């Protein structure tokens, strides 16, 4: 299990191409439980596109999580992209720290709705922050992983 300093010591910075290997390791640590194996190609393409607004969450120099947030001022909506936490630190506050950061950015951008594409396994995490299910598609991410589209209103 990865040692985690205090949650308050976690830092964020923009994704760099040199982070690709660590981010793919995050994906691998969550594969089958939260991501379907066939999604890895989509994630690799996403990272190769040097995604604007994609950040990594670090404990010292170790990447423990990553997420992207796209803000659309015109629609006052935002979208969460490829949020993942190293499986060895699930339940230890890293995801909560990321979500607090997302909500802060939304609030300071005067954006009121967050769109989240989750699975039936990750949806309860987002529901803890007030996200509600809007639709569900069986096996939408892969066999055994339903796609759950959610909205979180501020």
Image: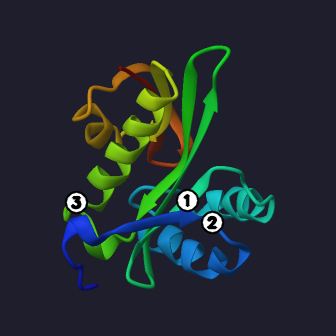
Residue identifier under label 2: 15
Q: Residue at x 37, y 52 (%)?
A: 98
Q: Residue at x 32, y 37 (%)?
A: 126
Query: Label 1 crowding class (10 Å Cα cut-off): few <14, some 14-19, many 20+?
Result: some
Element class at badge 3: loop
Q: Secondary structure at mark 2?
A: loop
User: How many residues crowd around disc 2 within 10 Å: few (fewer than 14), some, or many (20 or more)?
Assistant: many
Q: Residue furthest top?
A: 75
The residue shown at (22%, 60%) is 93
Residue at coordinates 32% horizontally, 44% vertically from top-left?
Answer: 100
Of the numbered discs 3 and 2, the one sitting upstream in the chain is 2
Question: Marks 2 and 1, how far apart in space?
Answer: 5 Å
Q: Of the two numbered discs 2 and 1 on the same chain, state the one appearing first in sequence.
A: 2
Q: Quadrant of residue 39?
A: bottom right
What percent of the width, then of the height, locates residue 63?
46, 76
Secondary element at image label 1: strand
Q: Which residue is mark 3?
A: 93
Pointers 2 and 1 in contact (C-beta within 8 Å): yes
Q: Which mark is residue 55?
A: 1
Give how far across and how far down residue 28 sits, in percent: 50, 73
């Amino acid at each position: 299990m990865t040692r985690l300093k205090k949650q308050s010591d976690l830092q964020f910075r923009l994704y760099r191409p040199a982070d690709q290997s660590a981010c793919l390791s995050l994906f691998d640590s969550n594969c089958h439980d939260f991501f379907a194996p066939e999604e890895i190609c989509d994630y690799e393409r996403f990272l190769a596109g040097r995604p604007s607004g994609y950040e990594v969450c670090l404990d010292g120099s170790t990447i423990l999580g990553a997420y992207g947030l796209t803000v659309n001022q015109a629609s006052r909506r935002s979208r969460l992209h490829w949020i993942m936490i190293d499986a060895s630190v699930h339940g230890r506050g890293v995801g909560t720290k990321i979500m607090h950061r997302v909500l802060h950015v939304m609030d300071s951008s005067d954006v009121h709705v967050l769109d989240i594409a989750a699975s039936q396994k990750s949806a309860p995490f987002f529901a803890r922050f007030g996200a509600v299910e809007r639709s569900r598609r069986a096996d939408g991410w892969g066999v055994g992983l339903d796609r759950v589209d959610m909205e979180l209103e501020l």
